Image: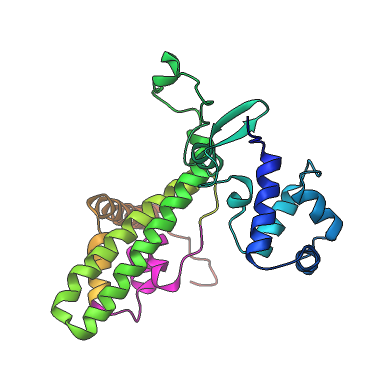
Amino acid sequence: MPDSSPTRHFAMSVRRHRSARGWTQPQLAERCQEAGLRWDRSIIANVEAGRRASVSLQEVLTLAYVFGVPPLLLLFPVGRSSEIEILPGQSVNTWAAAKWFTGEGQFPRGIGEQASEDAETEPDEDPREAEMAPIVLYRKHDSLMRQWILTALNAEHLRQAMPEKSADYFERASCIGNDLTLVRSEIRRHGLRVPPLPADLRYVDAETMADVVAALDGRPTPMREAVLRAWLTPERVRENNRAVNRALRDEADQRNQSASLPDTPTSTSER
């Protein structure tokens, strides 16, 4: 039975990436040292021969940086081997293991292992949801950012070439901005740090209409109009109305309190 251990696959990956670049072992060692990893030719020879059974996470990350590849490809032989021994004595499908590693899938079943009835029944609430939140939410955020950038670029191009057709794209971009607001709120709800936003999207984090208007200062009129239409959801309109009513009530209460205060007696000297 062929050896499907992670050590063997890692050794083969290092040797394959080094050879593909035409580097000798001393040349790879030199590049590793330039990146801050104190490896010499003998260490690389031992890694490639599988004689070095353990490699630190920092070493894997540095090698991936030196080769210019995702660390995943050094650890999982995607497209090169159908299975990998992910746990001692337990081999699983390589792609399923890679997806588990990146948070895109659950822990894969072993080769030939049958799913139990309990495993096939999805629970009402996935206990892993909170732990998976950073990956899921940041992926959503990245996807929406890409959509917004592409849509906004198209809108700006049409604004200059065919102004009458740009409104629809500005409308789409503003709706994507609303979705970003929801995702960022969910990120905060999980106690996570929100990713930074470009200047054109500062309005996404605005809490009041005044903040939105200020963030849109200098932006094209079609963009401002579309964003304001999308931002003024029924719930936000109700919240703004409630805020205005609270402010009016507070002002009225202050006037009433001032009117109910007794007049200050006038001193003899003033008389």
Taking 9 as reference, is 136 left or right? Answer: left
Q: Quadrant of the N terminus?
A: top right
Q: Nearer the viewer, residue 77 or 141?
A: 77
Residue 207, magenta (yes or no): yes
Residue 207 in view in this figure: no
Q: Nearer the viewer, residue 218 or 241?
A: 218
Name the quadrant containing residue 61.
Answer: bottom right
> As displayed, is residue 15 above or below residue 36?
above
Q: Nearer the viewer, residue 235 or 139?
A: 139
> Could you say where residue 7 lies in the image, as x and y percent from the top left?
71, 41
Task: Residue at 67%, 49% (x, y): give it.
Answer: 12
Task: Residue at 79%, 55% (x, y): give it.
Answer: 44
Residue extending furthest toward the front: 1
Q: Nearer the viewer, residue 86 or 128?
A: 86
Residue extending furthest toward the bottom: 160
Taking 54 as reference, is 154 left or right? Answer: left
Residue 166, magenta (yes or no): no
Task: Residue at 34%, 56% (x, y): give it.
Answer: 247
Taking 86 as reference, is 23 left or right? Answer: right
> Could you say where residue 77 lies in the image, as x and y percent from the top left?
57, 46
Taking 9 as reference, is 242 left or right? Answer: left
**Residue stretch in magenta:** 195-221
> Could you say where residue 175 lies in the image, as x and y percent from the top left?
27, 59
Residue 104 in view in this figure: yes
Task: Residue at 68%, 64% (x, y): give it.
Answer: 66
> As displayed, is residue 144 above or below residue 134?
below
Residue extending furthest toward the top: 117
> As displayed, is residue 8 above or below residue 169?
above
